[in-house]
């Protein structure tokens, strides 16, 4: 696109950042990738025009905000696109001073409601969206937790996935307790300070599913849906093999009920578990672009482009259509999932079946996330980073 505003993609080591760079770059949009370390994943793409090194937003948030202010001065008209729950709230809080940059983000209060898992739980109950039974626990109430109150396994979630401490921002994931002693150990280990809280949640048996939405000031613009075929860890987590599916009526209705009252602006991924009866249970909302974004782009649901349009023009060209049956495999994540499954509690027969499924290199509609012959270097960069993570030299992507 001639004279298209620059897109500045933050969090360059994220899979979503790479999908965004490829999406926008193919359309002729100049793209800069920012990360706190040299040679980030997304900057290895041929579509990256410039790599920017920035302060670590988790460890040095004040310096990072000052860096954002410097960007604002030097890149008038550019579109700023954060990818994580560390940078997104920092960008939102800095927006009053980022007058020269363009964004398509919800309000900070809406974002905090969606990202705070207990506030989201309360919102879901108010608007009639099905949620698992949930209990809030802190250091002061941990002693009141009684094993007979739960049916194991129990899902243990941090109330906030990214929690700011004096030492920096800590990112945390989900744990699973299979016994009373394991539940106590996870609670004791996971609570970071007196203000920290965890959600103890009923485990919903079923398959993972996602509804992905684009909103403009509370008005739905576009939806996409996928199902998770395999996840890391296998008990539930990040999708490593997923497939685009037709829009589920219950999932779409739940997304509208949750996000429209928040006057949502921009993108969101609503994660569900679908039980044996086909009922949708809300798990969480990712109030930003998500890990399996490349599947949506491959299917014709080009969310980075829609988001860029919303930021620059206030509207999008999105029409409600995409291909179903497309599959995306994150091979390195799938390898991790296999390893965790083989170490887990499953029977030998299930482990052998998992090994056979992993060994299947191709199936109809399947593409590999990093390996694209038209843009091969990100696959090598991802392998390098994965190897370094195994050697303990860096965090895994």
Image (cartoon, rainbow, N blue to C red):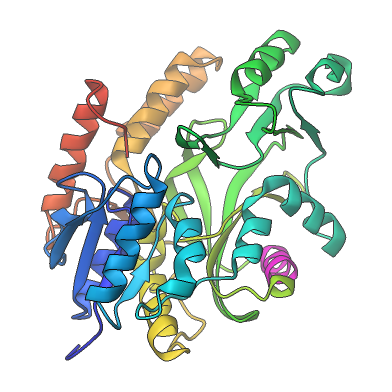
Q: Can residue 53 be seen?
A: yes
Query: Number of labelled discs?
Result: 0
Q: Nearer the viewer, residue 206 or 294?
A: 294
Q: Which residues are magenta?
A: 249-259
**Whole-percent x, y for residue 32 in the image:** 21, 66
Membership of 257 in magenta stretch: yes
Residue 53 drawn above or below residue 314 = above
**Whole-percent x, y for residue 323 in the image:** 43, 71
Please name the predominant secondary structure of the magenta segment in the image: helix
Q: Residue at x 70, y 33 (%)?
A: 197
Residue 192 drawn above or below residue 75 = above
Residue 14 drawn above or below residue 213 = above
Q: Residue at x 74, y 73 (%)?
A: 261
**Whole-percent x, y for residue 210 in the image:** 57, 56
**Whole-percent x, y for residue 148 in the image:** 88, 16
Q: Nearer the viewer, residue 246 or 298?
A: 298
Task: Name the residue furthest top.
Answer: 181
Q: Can residue 280 be seen?
A: no
Relative side of 139 to 82, left or right = right
Q: Quadrant of the C terminus?
A: top left
Membership of 197 in magenta stretch: no
Q: Nearer the viewer, residue 179 or 171?
A: 171
Q: Nearer the viewer, residue 112 or 360?
A: 112
Q: Residue at x 19, y 28 (%)?
A: 387
Relative side of 257 to 160, left or right = right
Q: Quadrant of the N terminus?
A: bottom left
Relative side of 218 to 368, left or right = right
Relative side of 138 to 373, left or right = right
């Amino acid at each position: 696109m001639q004279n298209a505003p620059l897109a500045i993609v933050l969090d360059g080591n994220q899979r979503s950042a790479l999908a965004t760079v490829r999406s926008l770059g193919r359309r002729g949009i100049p793209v800069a990738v920012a990360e706190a370390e040299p040679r980030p994943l997304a900057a290895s793409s041929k579509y990256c025009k410039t790599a920017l090194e920035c302060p670590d937003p988790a460890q040095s948030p004040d310096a990072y905000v000052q860096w954002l202010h410097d960007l604002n001065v030097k890149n008038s008209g550019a579109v700023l696109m954060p990818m994580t729950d560390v940078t997104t709230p920092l960008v939102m809080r800095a927006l009053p001073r980022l007058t020269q940059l363009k964004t398509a983000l919800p309000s900070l209060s809406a974002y905090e409601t969606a990202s705070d898992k207990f506030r989201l739980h309360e919102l879901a109950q108010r608007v009639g969206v099905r949620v698992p039974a949930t209990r809030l626990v802190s250091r002061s109430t941990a002693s009141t937790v009684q094993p007979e109150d739960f049916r194991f396994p129990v899902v243990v979630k941090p109330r906030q996935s990214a929690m700011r401490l004096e030492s920096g921002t800590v990112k945390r994931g989900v744990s699973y307790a299979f016994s009373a002693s394991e539940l106590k150990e996870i609670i004791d280990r996971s609570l970071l300070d007196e203000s920290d809280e965890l959600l103890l949640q009923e485990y919903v048996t079923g398959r993972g599913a996602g509804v992905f939405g684009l909103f403009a000031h509370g008005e739905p613009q576009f939806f996409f849906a996928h199902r998770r075929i395999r996840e890391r860890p296998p008990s539930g987590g990040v999708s490593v093999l997923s497939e685009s599916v037709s829009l589920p009526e219950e999932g779409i209705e739940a997304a509208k009920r949750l996000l429209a009252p928040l006057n949502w602006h921009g993108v969101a991924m609503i994660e569900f578990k679908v039980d044996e009866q086909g009922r949708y249970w809300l798990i969480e909302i990712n109030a930003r672009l998500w890990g399996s974004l490349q599947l949506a782009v491959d299917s014709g649901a080009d969310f980075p482009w829609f988001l860029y349009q919303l930021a620059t023009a206030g509207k999008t060209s999105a029409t409600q259509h995409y291909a179903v049956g497309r599959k995306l495999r994150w091979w390195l994540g799938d390898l991790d999932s296999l390893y965790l499954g083989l170490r887990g509690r499953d029977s030998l027969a299930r482990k052998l079946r998992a090994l056979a499924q992993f060994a299947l290199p191709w199936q109809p509609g399947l593409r590999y996330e990093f390996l694209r012959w038209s843009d091969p270097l990100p696959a090598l960069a991802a392998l390098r980073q994965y190897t370094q993570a195994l050697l303990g030299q860096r965090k895994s992507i």
